[in-house]
Amino acid sequence: MDTTMDDQMPQQKRKWPYIAFVLLFLWLFALMLSSFISLFAGIESDSLGGNVAIIPVKGVITGDPGSGLFDEGASSEEIVKLIEKADRNPGIRAIIVEINSPGGSPVASDEIAQALKKTNKTTVAWIREIGTSGGYWVASATDHVVANRMSVTGSIGVIASYLDFSGFIGRYNVSYERLVAGKYKDIGTPFKEMTPEERVLFQNVLDDLRDNFIDEVAANRGMDRKDVERLATGLFYLGSEAKGLGLVDELGGRGEAIAYIEQKEGIKAQVVKYKPTPSFVDILQGAFSEQSFHVGQGIGDALVEKGKTSSVQITA
């Protein structure tokens, strides 16, 4: 019996490479199938025509291109392309941005907002559950803002945070050897305590970002800057309260957004959803990329990237 088992062991070991190959093949086939489905779904959406484009802005807003498979954020690069695509389409009369986002990178949020303001189409923001910070920045750039009465919106303000490990590493007798060429090159590093001067510098950046945020909302909404400044405490509001404060035009959802467009444009709305259609290469790259499995928290990871010294996260 022992001899039989010994004979079977090498055979079982020889099977593992084939099993691994089959599993890898099936995985790649699933990725290809997903890519083709996404591609044909995009073609089908375009071929259906329509005169009102819905563009989703869901998840944390980032400037990174999405992988299309694991990515759960809203890529400003992809969203801007969709806005420009809808703007070039003569059959599209209006654009609805379907927002369900807590915000993201200040730069990425502004990129989407500027693209909406450049379009010649009627634009409507439809805030579902959440449209705060950068999400509201995007919404404010449209002609008309519709929000569910129980949605959360607003949160106009900026926050920065970082982890300070200086006390922790000191406790374990680990030292931080500072070697820089430039006084502020390691500003915001978690391995040393921030100096009062560095804190002032960061606060100035936050104040400037907040001022830009206020200016954009005031201009987009046609509100007095002082009124927006009073609201720019970082506090969030329910949709019903936001309407009373002038941040939202109408309470409702998709139906109200479409009704506004039909009345303004004098058309019978035929809705078509615009969404990114990643290629197989994009999906494959995303599957192997660290970014595919990273889900950002808050609106601003704009200053946090691999290889950068500063670990400060800025949220607007």
Image: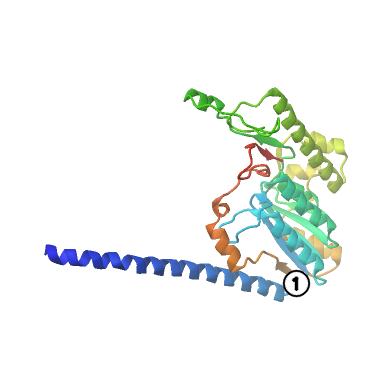
10 or 245, which lies in front? Answer: 10
Residue placed farthest to the bottom in the image?
47
Q: Is 9 left, or right, of 202 in this rendering? A: left
Please, what secondary structure does the residue beneath circle 1 have?
A: loop
Which residue is located at x 69 percent, y 40 percent? 315
Task: Assign the C terminus to one quadrant of the image.
Answer: top right
Residue 273 in the image: state x and y as whole percent.
69, 66
Report the label total: 1
For residue 304, above or below residue 166: below
Q: Quarter-wise, where is residue 207 in the image? A: top right
240 or 88, which lies in front? Answer: 88
Q: Quarter-wise, where is residue 228 in the image? A: top right
Residue 296 in the image: state x and y as whole percent.
60, 46
Q: Is 179 left, or right, of 209 in this rendering? A: left
Amino acid at pointer 1: Gly
Task: Assign the N terminus to one quadrant of the image.
Answer: bottom left
The residue wearing badge 1 is 50
Which residue is located at x 85 percent, y 67 percent? 266
Residue 200 in the image: state x and y as whole percent.
74, 27
Residue placed farthest to the left in the image?
1
Q: Is 296 left, or right, of 92 in this rendering? A: left
- Is residue 210 visible to the viewer in this orientation of the structure? yes
Q: Is 114 left, or right, of 302 in this rendering? A: right
Which residue is located at x 36 percent, y 69 percent? 18
Which residue is located at x 80 percent, y 51 percent? 141
